[in-house]
Amino acid sequence: MNVQTFTEILGADFYAGVPDSQLKPLCDYLMRTHGTDPKHHVIGANEGNCTALAAGYHLATGKIPVVYMQNSGEGNIINPAASLLNDRVYAIPVIFVVGWRGEPGVHDEPQHVYQGEVTVRLLEDMDIRTCIVGKETTEKELRAIMETFRTILAQGKSVAFVIRKGALSCEEKMEYTGIGTMAREEILRHIVDVSGEDPVVSTTGKASRELFEIREARGQGHQYDFLTVGSMGHSSSIALGIAVQKPEKKIWCVDGDGAVLMHMGAMAVLGACRPDNLVHVVINNGAHETVGGMPTAAGSADLVAAAKACGYPYAACAESFEQLDRELAAAKVRKSLSFLEVKCSIGSRKDLGRPTTTATENKERFMEYLKDEKH
C-alpha cells in the first residue's frame, strides 16, 4: 500500500516515533512532508517518550495522534499505555503503528525472534485493539478497519496497526547526511587499536556488526567483545555492571547517539557510580542510520556538556582522527571515568555482514574472557 494512502486513512496530523526499517516508507514520507516540525512530527528519544508527547498533543487539541515504532519498542510504551492512556485512567486515545520484526515464519535476527512472537499479544494485553497490515491488505479493507477503530478511539481506547515487511511503499526516498566526516568503521578500527585486549561492550546496530568484522579481519577472535544486538540504549549500563565488578580491567563501551538518547538517564547513574576503569565512547552521526538514516536529536545536543553535568570527571569531543587518537590514548591510561563523543558520517559497506556466532556463544566466550585473570 502506498504510504500516502495509508496516512490519509489514518487521518492524523501529528506523528511521534522512533524510526524503524520496516516503517521507512512512512518515516521518509513524514520527513519529506513535515521534516521535524514539532507541530506535526517529532522523532523522539524512546517510544515511551513519544507516547507521552502524543498524550500532550491530545490534551492540547482533542485530536488523535499517531505513535510509530519498531516492535522492539513496545516495552517502552507499556508504562504510559497502561497508566496514562488507558480508559480506566485518563482515556487518551492513540493510534500506534508498529513495524513487525521477527514475525513468526519470517527469517530475522536473533534479537527479534521472541519479540516478534509476543508483538500482538503484548498489545492485546494492554487492551489495544490490533490490526495486521500486509502486502495483501487492500485500501477498502483498511478503510473499513479504520471506521471500526474510530468507534474504539472515541471511547478513549488506543488501537494499533502492526505492519508486516513490505506492506508499505513509497516511490520517493529520502537521503540523509551525518554530522561528521569520519567513517564509523574506521573510527572503530582506531578504538580497537588502542583498546587492545580490553573488554568492549558495543551498542546495537551497525557498530557491533562492524566490530565483529574488524575482529574477523584481524584474526583476533571475539572473546573481547559483548555485542549488544538488542535492548537499544542499555549498552552503557551493561558496561557499568561489568566495570564495577571487574575494577582491575579497563572496560570500553562503544555507544551510538540514538542509543544514548533512548535511555539518557543511564549517564547520570554512570556519573554517580563513577567507575575509574570505564571509557564511554559515543559515535555520533546524528542519525538512526541502521534503520534508514532519519535524524536524532543528538545532532543539536551538547553530549559533552551533558556528560559533565551527569558527573563524568572527564568528557571531550573528537572531530578528526588526530583528535580521536589523542583522546583514546589518554583514556587508555586515565584512572577515572571518561566520556568521548566522536563526530561521524553516515554510511557503511554494502557488503557488511552480520555476526556468524550466536548471541549465546558471544556471551559465553565473553564471560570466560572476563574470568581470565591474565588479562
Image (cartoon, helix red, strand yellow):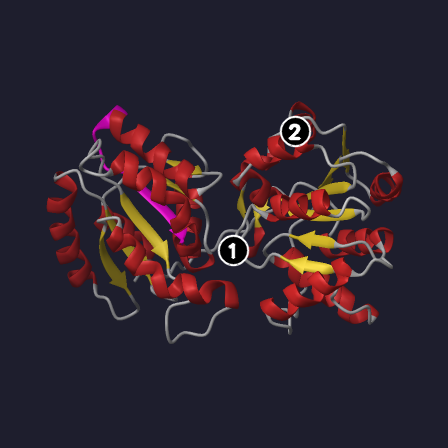
Which label belongs to residue 96?
none
Residues tagged 1 and 2 counted as in contact (Cβ below 8 A):
no
Q: Which residue is mark 2?
A: 272
351 or 174: nearer the eye? Answer: 351
| Amino acid on which disc 1 is placed | Val
Q: Quadrant of the N terminus?
A: bottom left
Q: Is residue 148 visible?
A: yes
Q: Classify residue 38 as left or right of residue 246.
A: left
Q: Secondary structure at mark 1?
A: helix
Q: Quadrant of residue 14?
A: top left
User: Which structural element holds mark 2?
Assistant: helix
- Against 220, is 313 above or below? above
Residue at position x 57%, y 47% in the image = 234
- Horizontal arrangement in the rendering, residue 157 relative to residue 75 (left or right): left
The location of residue 129, given as percent across then percent down, is 20, 53
Residue 153: say if magenta. Answer: no
Measured in 3D between alpha carbons, the distance from the residue under mark 1 to the one under mark 2, in whole angstroms, is 32 Å
Viewer-proximal residue among 204 and 334: 334
Residue at image location 41% in from the left, 61% down from the top: 115
Disc 2 residue type?
Answer: Ala
Q: Position of residue 89 (x, y in %)?
A: 21, 33
What's the residue at 81%, 54% (across, down)?
A: 198
- Residue placed under numbered mark 1 in the picture: 291
Q: Residues within 10 Å of mark 2 (few under 14, many from 20)?
A: few
Q: Which residues are magenta?
A: 60-70
N-terminal-most mark, 1 or 2: 2
Residue at x-position 60% and y-position 71%: 358
